[in-house]
Amino acid sequence: MSLDAFRGATIASMILVNNAGDSATTFAPLLHAKWHGWTFTDLVFPFFLWMVGIAMTFSYARRVEEGADKGKLLLHTLRRAAMIFALGLLLNGFPKYDLATLRIPGVLQRIALCYLIGSCIFLYTRWRGQLAAIVGLCTIYWMLMTLVPVPGFGPGVLEPVGNFAQWIDSMLLPGHMYARTKVWDPEGLVSTLPAIANVLFGALFGTLLRRDDLQPAEKASWILVAGAVLTFLGTFLDLFMPINKQIWTPPYAVFTSGLAALSFGCFYWLIDVCGYKRGTGWLTVYGMNAIAAYVLSGLTARLIGLSGWRPDIYAVFSGALPPYLASLGYALANVGLIYLAVWAMHRRGWYLRF
């Protein structure tokens, strides 16, 4: 239950930060860091990837222990990943689907790739192999970003233009990147490597949760201690390479995995250990249909924009509240609207699963 509630809190946060009424009058924590550094908003996506790792552990470990064929599990994983990737493309192109300019990377696309690669690593390794994969992925990415010279810029550039990840994306995805940046993409190809580490960190914590030799309170303690260690390690690594969500630096992957563990540890302690469930029901409803909530939010925002009603809707908030509170109120209204949709789906037993 704590995982569903934590996932629900994360997806609700994602909808909140994606639907500000006016970005010019939005509270700073609800905006991405301009480049280096982090805000509350920069924690949402890696938290979700971390939870993909935990869920993956519970999904696969039992089947493997029961002797399920790993090849068939991988085919099932490939099918799920392909459908999530396709859903991301569907959301990116809606409603025009201009293939010449369709953005290929995206949030769902990165989730699909990280889930697929993370599953392959999880199915064929134990926890030591997964830890080695984390170190390997982060090291390779660190070396690519700091040692490989980019034509016209040289090695080690970590600015929006001239870094290795941006160079590769500009060569392989010209015209198919994020419309606001055009020349680089925050969910690009190379920067997916350390994002896989977030999934694998989640898998390690999932393995800890499945241990039968530990009591729930002991598990909560280990989760919180390990989360604190990773958070400190990510902060320390920031001295050598900045924490940066846009290029998903290794310190960012480590730091956000630590904060995800600390946050989930609190949920686990309160809900599953102490049995405190009051007020968490709506989060659970969100968490059980997280992908549906995200897709509905994106489609709703796009439809409101296309209808031309958005200025009139926002005027209701801006006319009654100060600018910053009006922007927040509009975002919260989106969270409430999507909750009503997933609540109705929950009541009917409808869940978007692959």
Image: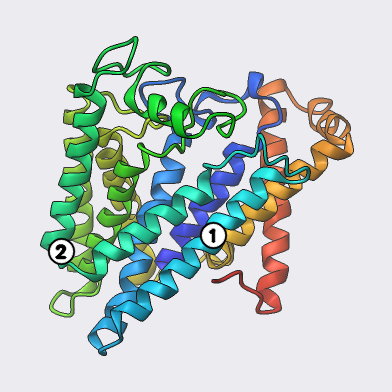
Q: Picture coordinates of residue 59 (x, y %)? A: 36, 75
Q: In the rendered view, does 71 fall on the left or right side of 133?
A: right
Q: Residue furthest bottom?
A: 66
* Residue at the spot 72% in from the left edge and 22% down from the top edge: 322
What residue type is disc 2 on? Trp
Q: Vertically, is 222 above or below 164? A: below
Please name the residue shown 73% across and 52% down the image: 337
Residue at 66% across, 37% down:
19
- Residue for point 29% across, 57% down: 202
Separation of residues labelled 1 and 2 (CA atoms): 26 Å
The image position of residue 235, as x and y in percent, is 22, 31
Q: Nearer the viewer, residue 317 or 229?
A: 229
Residue 60 appears anywhere in the view:
yes
As drawn, is 100 to the left or to the right of 149?
Answer: right
The spot of residue 112 in percent (x, y) is 46, 56
Asked if the residues shown at circle 1 and circle 2 are in contact, with their CB atoms under 8 angstroms apart, the answer is: no
Q: Relative to 262, does residue 168 appear above or below in the rendering?
A: above
- Height in image: 105 above or below 1? above
Per the image, the residue denoted by label 2 is 127
Check disc 1 and give the amino acid type. Ile
Quarter where residue 331 is shown: top right
Q: How many marks?
A: 2
Q: Nearer the viewer, residue 19 or 276?
A: 19
Closer to the camera in the image, 174 or 193: 174
208 left or right of 107 in image: left
**Residue 262 can be seen in this image:** no
Q: Quadrant of residue 216?
A: bottom left
Q: Secondary structure under badge 2? A: helix
Q: Which mark is residue 84?
A: 1
If the image is split into quadrants, where does the C terminus sit?
Answer: bottom right
Mark 1 residue element: helix
